Image (tube, grey):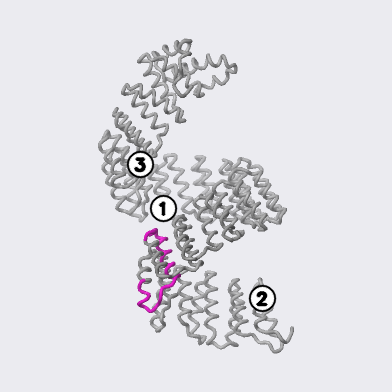
Amino acid sequence: MSPTLLPKHVAAVIKYQKHPLKALEVFNSVKNEDGFAHTFITYKCMIDKLGFYGEFEAMERVLMDMRMNIDSSLMEKVYIGVIRSYGKKGKVQEAVDLFERMDFYNCEPSVLSYNAIMNILVGHGYFNQAHKVYLRMKDKGITPDVCTFTIRMKSFCTTKRPHAALRLLNNMPCQGCEHNAIAYCTVISGFYEENHQLEAYELFNRMLMSGILPPISAFNKLIHTLCKKGCTQEGEKLLNKILKKGVYPNLFTCNVFIQGFSRKGAVNWAISLLDGMTKEGLTPDVVTYNTLICGLCKSSKVVEAENYLHKMVNEGLEPDSFTYNTIIHGHCKMGMIENAEKILDDAIFKGFIPDEFTYCSLISGLCQDGDTDRAMALFDDTLRKGLKPSIVLYNTLIRGLSQQGLILEALQLMNKMPEDGSAPDIWTYNILINGLCKMGCLSDAVNLMNDAIAKGYPPDIFTFNTLIDGCCKQFKMEKAIDIIDNMWTNGVTPDVITYNSVLNGLCKASKTEDVTELFNNMLQKGCIPNIITYNIVIESLCKARKVNKALELLEEIGNMGLTLDSVSFGTIISGFCNNGDLDGAFHLFSRMEEQYKMSHTRATYNIMIKGFSSQLDMLMAEKLFLEMSDKGCAPDSYTYRVMIDGFCKTDNIDSAYNFLLEKIETGFIPSLATFGRVINCLCLQHRVHQAVGIIHLMVQNGIVPEVVGRIFEADKKVVAAPKIVVEDLLKKSHLTYFAYELLYDGVRDKKQKRRKLPTGLT
């Protein structure tokens, strides 16, 4: 090498060399050059490069060499870099060890070193240890700076204490530290994480009014928090605020928003944002397109996703494995296997190498499509091409076979795994156990679990929950409770899903006392019930006509901080109705909106309408029917049926007849029983022409027995279909014989045929 080689030249080569060990070779080779000696800058560049790529053994050797050749008073900056490198790779203990040895190496840690180690400890959840480091720093007389306080605020926010972080932020000026944007954004983000949107927004405004503008990097972190929680609208509000202050978004900002919109399923907004980026002078990158393509595929818009694949290629961007795998997976989920294969062929032509994820998507898609033979052939072909058979690949095919009911083939495939140098895991067994339970083969599922235990694969919570669910669906409740006892024996703690499955089974079997006992046992074991648990217990109490106890439980749920749902109210309202206590039902129905601020659903309206209809109070039933429509709860087929039944029982045949016609106009098809009930009532009042009109209406709407479809001649069908419908209604006991006799003559009467069909339905 030239004798004019300077340290800055070596540092530049090291910095731009992509491979860390090749950079190390360059670093070591220049030692032999006459007149050259490594300086602080070359050592630091080399140590940073090795630390960044996780080559820690080589890094420690260079660091040891540096200690012998560089003044220890200059080393703190290097140690901080090494501590951060360890932290980024999750090697917290190594970072702490180096920090503790700094004194030994004659390098007194300053506030910068303390900040570095505290930040790593907080970032990895070691909050108590970080606090101890802070106290040690204070004992040594080292003055905290704004970064120290920000790290402490981050600790408070991560442990769900944003108000403590705010107190620290407010106290900073008293400690001699001025506020900065990073400190503000940390606390604002903490409030948003805990859903304190109003306080977060007010603090954001306070920051701007103080003349502190967040750098775009800090703002992006804040926006990422919001978008991750699905609060994209709140993010847009903040963006509009900083735009007015002259802070402009960068590409990362747009990418975060596109990801946020895509996660919410608002892909049209994401597309609009992408289209608007170019107008603002921002050029989308591969991450931008990948984010949008992923969102489109999750929203089942795979054709649009493929269009954006072509668009990114046209703009000179090169799709990566994520791009192709996302689109292939999206097509496979939609059952568009041929399209997925065409995309794969084109990708391979362009240099893409299919990986495990690619083949898993195709195999899963083929199985979902019922083409298990091709799935197995593709699996074999994958192995022939040299792809190492992994547990993920095996489990994908085993799951696909199990879902198609091919349990024997799935078991054979699991047994074949050792031949290919692979071995099943507990998930393999769980897939098969789940398949056996769905087929009702409980004893085989239990035997398979015992086989897994014997082979050294201890069952997990999913294994037991699957077996318990299988038992409950077959009402083998004693067996389900035995499995819970077996869980404790195997060191697995039953969770809320476990208890909910058994409680639901006991409830369906009307074993109210057992439900109460198991619920109390669940609480004693320290398992916290969720709203589903309480809804099951409420249903059980209502079934046993203990509605007042269920009502007490409703109050208890609110006191526990759980969010009540419409199921909780609907179950108790239904319990009151079944007890004949319509006053109690309607009182709770009213309190639902007034006291609990919960909107009524179609289900709660239907329960109340059914209750009033059963008591023949059709005035209240009709009032609620009109109210539900006004409040945006469109009536469904059940609502109309209940109303029609009630009108028929109260001999209000005009309303029953009009509701039947309205139901059909709305697009619902009434049941044969509903048609029969209205026709019977019309015939009792000798309104045969309207009853016949309904028969012809049924024929027009295709509500006819299958035999009508076998009559190919149109003229014959017109004559025969009404007669067949009438006979079918009688045969299925939906018509009285009196109505049948009137109708049979009526459908043959040419005068009746010429009568106008119900308005709007001709």
Residue type at mark 3?
Answer: His
**SS category of the residue bearing label 1:** loop
Residue pictured at 46% horizontal, 53% vertical:
461
Location of residue 374 with respect to 261 vertically, above or below: above
Residue type at mark 2?
Answer: Ala
Q: Earlier in the sequence, mark 3 or mark 2?
A: 2
Apparent side of residue 535 relative to residue 220 in the rendered image (left or right) = left
Magenta-drawn stretch contains 178: yes
Residue type at mark 1?
Answer: Asp
Depth check, mark 2 against mark 1: the one in front is 2
Q: Earlier in the sequence, mark 1 or mark 3?
A: 1
Disc 3 target residue: 600
Viewer can see residue 293: yes
Depth check, mark 1 against mark 3: the one in front is 3
Q: Indicate which disc residue 23 carries.
A: 2
Cα distance in 3D space between marks 3 and 2: 68 Å
Picture coordinates of residue 72 (x, y %)? 54, 87
Viewer can see residue 328: no
Crowd class of label 1 (few under 14; some 14 to 19; many from 20; radius 10 Å): some
Quarter of the image for residue 738 reads top left
